[in-house]
Image: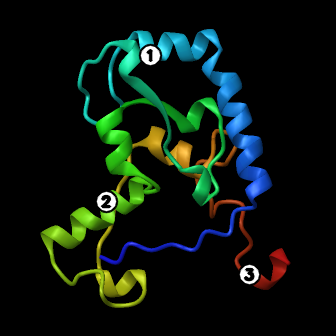
Amino acid sequence: MEEWFDMRVDPAQIAKERAKARELRRTNWWRAQIQKGICHYCGGEFPPSELTMDHIVPLSRGGHSTKGNIVPCCKACNNAKKYTMPVDEILTELDREDPGCMDAQGPEAADVEIELPDDLMRELVGDTDDAPDDPGKDAPDDPEQGI
């Protein structure tokens, strides 16, 4: 799988998010996270001083410095992860299991359905508790009516 992405995040936005991360690092919430001594990715146990702050969705890919996007991470995992996101690992694993399955264009060409845990979906797409249980329930039958 190619390792490229288009970095078009405003450097001023990244600086702002880094400042927010520095503020979060001083909070009781962050201290409690690292006191657990567990790396979010490998599950290894480490002294709190050896855990780093990692953005699940990296700042360079549009991520934000929020509690839902920041996790404690060992240095080895943080260095290995770099600018990748969870979906990158999922796609890499799919390609490893079935080489070439992601070569075709479009989701129907790959014929793969990925089911993510609810908590990860909330992190990636936002909290949907206010959304109706059946998204199509209130939608008009004719798509033109909704415009």
10 Å crowding of disc 3: few (<14), some (14-19), many (20+): few
Q: Which residue is mark 1?
A: 34
Q: Name the amino acid type tagged 1.
A: Ile
Could you tell me how many numbered marks the image carries? 3
Mark 1–mark 3 distance (CA, rounded to whole Å): 49 Å
Q: Secondary structure at mark 3?
A: helix
Q: Is residue 41 left or right of residue 13?
A: left
The crowding category of the residue bearing disc 2, from other C-alpha atoms within 10 Å (few below 14, some 14 to 19, many at least 20), is few
Which three-letter amino acid code belongs to the residue tagged 2? Ile
x then y, percent, for residue 14: 70, 50
Task: Report how far apart the C-alphas of labels 2 and 1 lie in the structure.
Answer: 26 Å
Residue 142 drawn above or below residue 36: below
> Residue 121: where, in percent of width, then height?
49, 48
Q: Give the residue number, with chain letter if any, for mark 2.
A: 90
Residue 104 percent coordinates (x, y): 33, 90
Q: Nearer the viewer, residue 65 or 14?
A: 14
Give SS at disc 1.
Answer: helix
Viewer-nearest of discs 2 and 1:
1
Asked if 49 appears above or below 22 in the picture, the reply is: above
Q: Which one is closest to the eye, mark 1 or mark 3?
A: 1
SS at mark 2 in the image: helix
Return the disc, 1 or 3, that comes first in the chain's sequence. Answer: 1
In the image, farthest residue toward the bottom? 104
Q: Which mark is residue 143?
A: 3
Lower position in the chain sequence, tag 3 or tag 2? 2
Q: Identify which residue is drawn at 16% across, 69% down.
A: 96
- Mark nearer the N terminus (2 vs 1): 1
